[in-house]
Amino acid sequence: MPRIKKKIVKRRAGCKYRLCTVCRQYKLIKNFYNCKAIKDGLSYRCIKCDDKARAKWLKDNPEKARESARGRNIKIKYGINKKDYEILLKEQRNRCAICRTKTPRTLNNLSFCIDHCHKKNIIRGLLCSICNRTLGLLKDNIKILYKMIEYLNKHR
């Protein structure tokens, strides 16, 4: 049985190398992702092995991957987490804030759109895809909305 060196980082010609625990090869430390959870700040597997593992996980867990990505996106874009989203949804009784439908009408029908004011950067509510797109096309202009109402009433 070959003896595995415990020392992971070693010096060769002034460069730092690290052992990938998956492919068992010494590689330059630039070939490893940063990882705050590990003491020396580098991932235990090289970028190539890490990418393979991530791709396999994404393929094996598509629902978790989609949910995780949605959570990250709403946190980055709107500053709320999944729990905050669920609270908003509960306050609206699981319905669109405008048309009151229970169906989000998005491509995957999984979640309502988060409507927000672009000027004040605050969340106004959760909308189905159709209501959200309509507000966007109107550019939140109330005058245009009134003119549309007049037009519809005129041509009843």
Image: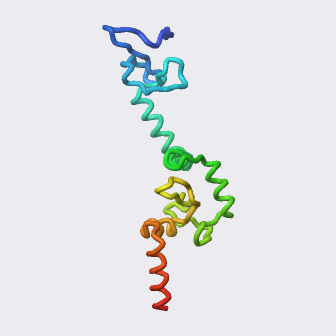
Depth check, front residue: 134 or 39: 134
Q: Is residue 100 above or below residue 37?
A: below
Q: Is residue 110 left or right of residue 50?
A: right
Residue at (34, 9) in percent of width and height: 12
Whether residue 6 is visible to the viewer of this picture, yes or no, is yes
Depth check, front residue: 35 or 44: 35
Residue 126, percent from left and from top: 58, 61
Whether residue 2 is visible to the viewer of this picture, yes or no, is no
Depth check, front residue: 92 or 19: 92
Residue 52, percent from left and from top: 43, 35
Q: Is residue 8 above or below residue 111?
A: above
Residue 102, percent from left and from top: 62, 67
Residue at (60, 66) in percent of width and height: 97
Residue at (33, 9) in percent of width and height: 14
Q: Is residue 16 left or right of residue 132?
A: left
- Seen as rendered, the residue at the extreme left is 13
Q: Is residue 59 above or below residue 3?
A: below
> How are the residues colored?
rainbow
Q: Is residue 55 above or below residue 8?
A: below
Q: How many marks do you count on the picture?
A: 0
Residue 18, percent from left and from top: 42, 16
